[in-house]
Amino acid sequence: MRGLCGGWLLKKAAGGSGKRKITSLPQGTQGLNSRTELKECRTELKVCRTELKECRTDLKEWMMVALLVSKEDERNLKVKLDTAEDELDREGQIINFYKTPNIDWARPFHAKLQGDVAIGDGVARHFLSLVIHKLKHGFAIDVGNSCGAMLFEGQSDHLVPSTSNIFMQNDMFIMAGRMIGHAFLHSGPRLTGLSPAVLHVLAGGTPQTATIALEDINDIDVRETIGPLYEVCESNNGNLTTLSVEQRDAINKLAVEMDYSILKETNRCWLLHNLLQDAVFGRIKEQLKQIKQGLKETYVLDLLEARPDAITQVFPSEAEATCSPEVVLDFIQWPQEDDGQEPKKIKEFLMQFISTVSQDKLKQLVNFWVGWEIPMTQMKVEVVDSNNYPRASTCFRTLHLPSHYQTYDDFRQSLEMCLGTSEFGFGLI
């Protein structure tokens, strides 16, 4: 208190025996400056609180890193996939693994392909790549339709969880959350293309505050019904007179089915907001809860709650997950230039292949090379004197290319034949 001075003290108490007299004190010339200093103190206090909050957030991130480090000496989490089984049996092994409760997913991860000689980190990368591929593109298991099991539906960057009750009753979305979190913990592939509105909820937001796009609606009939109203509300000069009688009737019918009032000039934006809410989130709220439960079991939900901006690291968009030729070429360690003309020719063939093939083919190449679709540093190329097909040592990130190819077309055809074997293990064709 001795350090306090100026005009901040306005009243003085005096007296005793349980009585207090309050008298005003004269204000000096420092009163205005003291108020300014008080304001500055309050500002500094706010800054301190903000910094404290950031420190707590950073602490949670460091706690996650420390968690993984603390698990390094624990018993490996092991999974075995039988390459001799058919696709349905292999999928069953994956599903059973991720539906097992009470597993510490931060433990060191070890995967083995039964019937294949491959061992090491490359097998684990291959397994996680296969898991995320199945999660995004669907399982072949029979769920009573001819399309397989698609846990996420819709168009690219607007995927939303399926409304299937069968998946809900079998806790498939808890399994999906575990798959996503497990792959993220071990720096594996990400599930790409989810709707930003869904990501908003997974990051801790509410459906009511999510920005919903028309493309997020999977029901084509509902999307076509809401579409004209969406355009009216998005347009600065739009009004309901631009809607045809048939369009207004369809919107009103949908509104009544969803227990909302019919369309009016005064409620058009309110009605649009609620129709979008019901069309996207009306039947997937429980699915999102299950996904969050799976993410929580893998510690990823704690990260998202502390850092909502990290949601794009866990669930990148399709564009952010693009495997560019420039990145792949930059990560390659090429053979020495003085190794002869054959390695130089094969190097040129591989560079042409990487630079000209489609995005899907390029991802297949990276997957064949290192075990998953994510380019990694120190991707080595070794040109060997052999008449066999190309092969890869994924654990050592090494692509072995035979030197016998005389034309680019022969090289391309041979390499593309090998890329299609990645899903079934590491055997040669």
Image (spheres, rainbow, N blue to C red):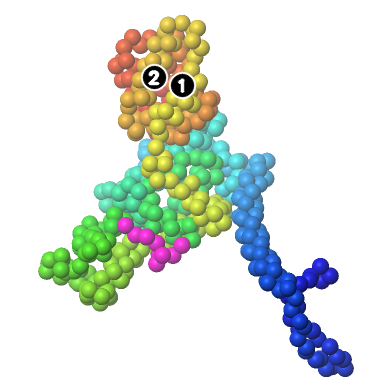
Magenta stretch in the rendered image: 205-213
Residue drawn at x 66%, y 68% as measured from the top left: 36
Q: Nearer the viewer, residue 14 or 197?
A: 14
User: Which residue is rendered at x = 52% and y = 28% of the image?
Assistant: 377
Residue that numbered label 1 is attached to: 399
User: Which residue is tagged 2?
Assistant: 350
Q: Is residue 255 left or right of residue 340?
A: left
Label 2 element class: helix
Is residue 327 visible in the rendered image? The answer is yes
Quarter of the image where one finds residue 211? bottom left
Q: Residue furthest front?
A: 29
Up-down relation of residue 130 to residue 240 (above or below)? above
Q: Nearer the viewer, residue 243 or 254?
A: 243
Question: In this view, which residue lies farthest toward the left?
Answer: 245
User: Badge 1 local density, few (<14 within 10 Å), some, or many (20+)?
Assistant: many
Amino acid type at circle 2 is Leu
